[in-house]
Each structure stands twice: as structure tokens, then as C-alpha cells.
Image: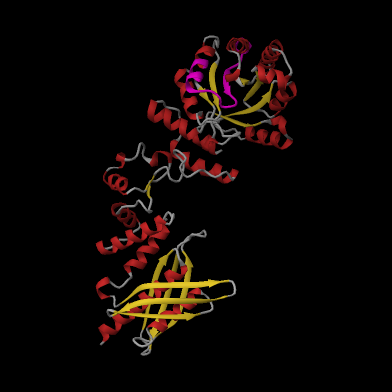
Amino acid sequence: RQLARLGVDVIEAGFPISSEGEFLAVKRIAKEKLNSKICGLARAIKGDMDKALDADVDRVHVFIATSDIHLKHKLKMTREEVYQRAVESVEYLKGHGVEVEFSAEDATRTDLEFLKQVYGGVAKAGADYLDIADTVGIASPEVISKLVDAVKSISGRSIISVHCHNDFGLATSNTIAGVLAGAEQFHATINGIGERAGNASLEEVVMSLEVLYGYQLGINKKLIYETSRLVSRLTGIYVQPNKAIVGDNAFGHGAGIHTHGLIEEPSTYESINPEMVGKKRWLVAGKYAGSHGIKAQLESLGIKPKEEQLKTIVLKVKELGDKGKVVTDTDLVAIASSVMGQVSAEERALSLEEFIVVTGHKVMPTASIKVKFDGKEYVASQMGVGPVDAAMKAIQEVLKDTIRVSLKEYRIDAVTGGSDALAEVTVRVEDANNLQASARTAGPDIVQTSVEAMLEGINKLLLKRKYQA
């Protein structure tokens, strides 16, 4: 149904002879009466063709191998026998009133004169479509162009089609070459899925032909991304992030220079508007991120930091990027929230100089910390039931002669999924006079983020004291 909505002309629904389940699936799809024609695949064998006909499809795609390597090792047939089988199969199917597409399997490794003989014979027998199959993905664009020209010369009223595999990464290029040479139909799959390295990618071929060559194919391009994700979800086959047109990174921009230009004018770094295929551009927050991109990303999320806050946010994002993490919108919100809620540098009385935590199997977790408070350095070490507990106790110990604080609340949340998820730590601290302050920080390291949250809470407590004095 989604392919029909997308505007695909013909849907090859399956190979009915392969199993009863496949047969029933093809038959059910044919009964849907979609706007697209439904096609069933069949070998040039009567049982296969009958099964496809029984599925009530609009078209039968019948095929037989024509290369010498297939004739010798798979079919055990002569060229004459293959020719006769091909012609008789097309005649049989046309006699049942269906549209017929004929493929010479392994056409690109077939002797050209024999290939023309086969295509010429099935064209005279009434084949509606002559499909040139690059079964093992061995062809180049030049080869496909020449084959289309050659088959056109004997095709009569039959329409030329191309079927390209991606073994050398040329399926899209070969398909485009075939169309430019005169093929009026091409085979493609969503996300390029298929045997071995896959088939020509529908989204790549469609967008290339329409945008680069001016073709109008009748595809509802705004449904391309939606269809890609549906197929990925149903098949369980992951779409690589840098996949052209539909990959998550296809319209993601990370370099600071790029994002700056993109914000001013999208066409500076985009060949097409992502909305054409139902996507949205996004600015990647990572090691190459610039302040313009992060500011725009934050503003799109309703967050407007001050210049000094923005500098700190950018610095934290770059630090995460250096560690290999791509910062998501959720991560960015957490980072911005923690930075924008911090005591300013001018008002911060307490700062972290160094800390180290030791933990392990049969090792008592121990934390050592050095802080600077009102210009003086203080050092302390403490043990705890875990690394975070040891670090919190070390902070309390290092300040016991200056400001006695207790940790009243500690909470940690994973901002996003995965083992590299950003941790968001919230603390509430209290002094001897029952004055309290809360702080929240975010970072990739749970212990360090906890230490930063604790120190931030104490700084807020000190600030409260100052203004209440």
C-alpha cells in the first residue's frame, strides 16, 4: 500500500512458486486493487508460470539465464534450447491475457549476438517488456548504455527495462545510464535492499533523474523518507547513516563553516531541500560544530543562551565530540540547561582543580580531590561504597573547615539511550543553617558529572549566603 501511495508503477510482489505462503501473499496483494500493477516472478517453467497466473497478478515477469556460464553449469541446456524455452514461455503467458515482462538472466555476461537473438524472439512472441538483467552487478554505465542500444535495435514495440545489482556500487549509475540510453522502465528497491550488495536504490535513482536530468517520474517524493523508514522497520535492515537521500546524516551538517553558511542560505551546502523527500535538515552538534550552528539549533528548541553561556555550551559539545559522541537534541538541551543554570564565573567561589577515583574488584572505592576556594587550594581523600559516594564524601571532607555541607538529594538520569548516553545529575545540598540549594549538570562521565553537580550546588549555596548576609 505504501509503494502504491509512493507512486510506484509496478510492484513485483513475490515469487509465487517459492512457497505456499509466498503464493498467498502475492494473491492477497493482487486482490488489494491498488493503483500500481502487481507482478509475479516466474522461471521459464510451466509450473512457475501457472502459479503466478493463479495468483491473479496483472503482469508475470518470466526469466531464463542466457550466459554460457549459466547454460553450462546451471541449466545444462544449449543456446537453441534456451531460445525455444524463452519464446514458448512468453507465448504461453500472452495466451493467458496477462502483461509479460521477459528477463535474460545474466544478460551482461551473455554473448551479444545470442542476447539479441533471444530478445528479438521474445519481442516477436509478444513480450511487453524486455528487461536487461545485470544479475551479478558486473556492468559499467558504458556497458549498460551499449546493451540498451543493442536491444532497442531489435525490440520492436516492446519496452526496454534495466535491472541492476550493486556489487561494484554502480547500481544507481548503471540504472541512470540505462534510462538515458532509452530504457523506459527500471527496477529499483527501497533503500537499495536486495541480493548480496543490493539493487538500485529507488530514492537515489528517482532523485537523480528528476533533479539532475529533469525527468518527471510520477513519484510522490515527499513520501520517500517515510517509505524508507517503513521498509527498514519491517525488514529489520538498518539504513546506514550516510546513505544518500534517506540516511540520518544525509541532511545533517556538523562543520562550523557549513552550518554558518547553511543558516544564511541553505543552498550553500545542500543540493536539494530535504523537505522534497519528507525529511528535515539538522545541525550536528559535535567536535566540528560552530557557535552559529549550535545557537541556531538551540533557538529552534526554544533556548536562547547568553554569549558567555553559548561559549561554554559549545566547549562542552566539542569535548563530547572529541570523545566520539554525536550530541543529540536531547543531549544539547541537557547541556544548555546545566550551563544556563550555573553560577557565573565571576561569582563562583569554589572551583575544581583535580580529582581522581580508584575502584575495581576487591578494591575499596577511593576518591581524592583538590579544589580552590577563595584563592586557596584544599586537598582531601575519602572512601565510599562506590566511586560517586567516595567523590561526594571527598568534597565534603575537603570543605569541612570552611563550609560544612550535607548532600540531601542525589538523582541521576540517562538523557539518551546507549552505553555512551549523557548522564544528567541533580543534587540538593544543605549547610549547617538549613540553607539549601539545588544544581543540575550533564556529561558523559557519571562520576565527573556528579562532582561538578555537587560543586555547583555548593557555589549556589555560597551565593545564597552572600546575598542573605
Quadrant hosting residue 308: bottom left
Residue nearest the observer in this picture, 396 or 189: 396
* Magenta segment boundaries in residue numbering: 122-147
Q: Is residue 270 visible?
A: yes
The spot of residue 390 in percent (x, y) is 48, 78
**Left-right relation of 410 to 134:** left
Residue at 32%, 40% in the rendered image: 269
166 or 227: nearer the viewer: 166
Residue appearing at x 70%, y 33% in the figure: 23
Q: Quadrant of the N terminus?
A: top right
**In this picture, is 281 found above or below 385?**
above
Kindly identify the residue that appears in the image at 29 percent across and 84 percent down. 465
Q: Position of residue 249 (x, y in %)?
A: 43, 45
Membership of 314 in magenta stretch: no
Image: 309 above or below 260: below
- Quadrant (top left/top right/bottom left/bottom right) for the C terminus: bottom left
Which sits in the foreground, 323 or 84?
323
